[in-house]
Image (cartoon, helix red, strand yellow):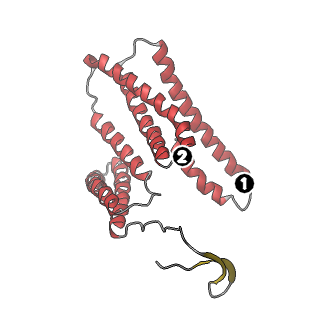
């Protein structure tokens, strides 16, 4: 939720940069943010409260706690690691407590699952839930890298992982839609997402991101630039490349 809100805030800010946003836009944004933060706070607080006060938790509770907090650990842990890699100490320090909290809750859920393992009965849709969790995790990992500069190695990995997923899930979508089953639309959307990542990977294989230009030693000087119609001040440089 934090990542979704943070990413969604940029287009809204850009759209309202030249003029104040209409009140109804702000109202929708604040309502959505409040609902997301409230739901996250309630869900996490519910688990913490029951972990501390309820000694007789069921196996289903342990599975739910382990699964939800595993995603939370991956989300906040990924943000923390990325922030540390880019020397953003403030961001890393902000998300680190959330990563630690969800890690602790995930461990507790795993411990509860181990204790109640004798009551385990594989649910009918266990593989579907497991596959859905793996798909969402995969999508989050590749989505977090879309704004970065990557070479051919990254493109090969992205295409190699997501192309088979797109083909397999696409076949499931075709099979379900061929029998007029509504789940075909869900599989179709998932296949489209994986296909998008695969295409992005192929683009990086064909045309990898160019290396960053070394700006050291550049001789910059004021100049006038033109697009053939208008003229404007700018900067020019002379250097042997």
Label 2, on which residue? 88
Please give the name of the residue rendered at 38% of the width and 44% of the height, measured from the top-left corner: 136
Q: Please, is residue 97 above or below residue 239 in the view?
A: above
Q: Position of residue 170 (x, y in %)?
A: 29, 55
**Horizontally, is 5 left or right of 160 in the view?**
right
Front-most of residues 107 and 18: 107
Q: Position of residue 156 (x, y in %)?
A: 29, 60
* Residue 178 circle label: none
Q: Please, is residue 104 above or below residue 164 in the view?
A: above
Farthest residue, direction front: 217
Q: Position of residue 175 (x, y in %)?
A: 25, 53
Number of marks drawn: 2
**Horizontally, is 185 left or right of 148 in the view?**
left
* Residue 22 circle label: 1
Front-most of residues 238 and 172: 238
Please give the name of the residue rendered at 51% of the width and 18% of the height, measured from the top-left corner: 49
Q: Please, is residue 174 above or below residue 129 in the view?
A: below
Please give the name of the residue rendered at 59% of the width and 75% of the height, measured from the top-left corner: 219
Please give the name of the residue rendered at 51% of the width and 47% of the height, measured from the top-left corner: 87
Q: To which quarter of the image does residue 149 belong?
A: bottom left
Choose the circle earlier in sequence order: 2 or 1.
1
**Horizontally, is 212 left or right of 154 in the view?**
right
Front-most of residues 218 and 128: 218
Give the spatial CA distance, label 2 vs label 1: 34 Å
Per the image, label 2 sits on a secondary structure element best described as loop
Q: Position of residue 75 (x, y in %)?
A: 45, 40
Farthest residue, direction bottom: 228
Classify 10 Å Cα crowding around label 2: few (below 14), some (14-19), many (20 and above).
few
Per the image, label 1 sits on a secondary structure element best described as loop
Q: Nearer the viewer, mark 2 or mark 1?
A: 2
Q: Are marks 2 and 1 in contact (CB under 8 Å)?
A: no
């Amino acid at each position: 939720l934090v990542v979704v809100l943070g990413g969604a805030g940029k287009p809204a800010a850009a759209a309202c940069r030249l003029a104040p946003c209409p009140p109804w836009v702000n109202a929708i944004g604040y309502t959505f943010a409040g609902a997301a933060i409230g739901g996250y706070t309630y869900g996490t607080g519910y688990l913490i409260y029951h972990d501390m006060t309820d000694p007789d938790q069921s196996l289903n509770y342990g599975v739910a706690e382990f699964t939800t907090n595993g995603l939370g650990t991956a989300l906040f842990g990924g943000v923390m690691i990325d922030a540390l890699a880019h020397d953003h100490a403030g961001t890393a320090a902000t998300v680190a407590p959330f990563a630690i909290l969800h890690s602790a809750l995930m461990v507790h859920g795993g411990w509860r699952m181990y204790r109640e393992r004798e009551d385990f009965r594989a649910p009918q849709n266990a593989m579907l839930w497991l596959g859905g969790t793996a798909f969402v995790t995969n999508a989050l990992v590749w989505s977090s890298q879309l704004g970065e500069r990557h070479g051919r190695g990254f493109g090969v990995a992205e295409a190699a992982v997501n192309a088979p997923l797109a083909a397999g899930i696409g076949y499931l979508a075709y099979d379900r839609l061929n029998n007029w089953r509504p789940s075909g639309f869900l599989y179709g959307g998932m296949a489209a997402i994986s296909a998008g990542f695969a295409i992005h990977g192929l683009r990086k294989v064909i045309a990898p991101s160019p290396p960053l230009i070394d700006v050291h030693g550049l001789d910059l000087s004021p100049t006038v630039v033109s697009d053939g119609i208008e003229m404007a001040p700018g900067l020019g440089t002379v250097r042997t490349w």
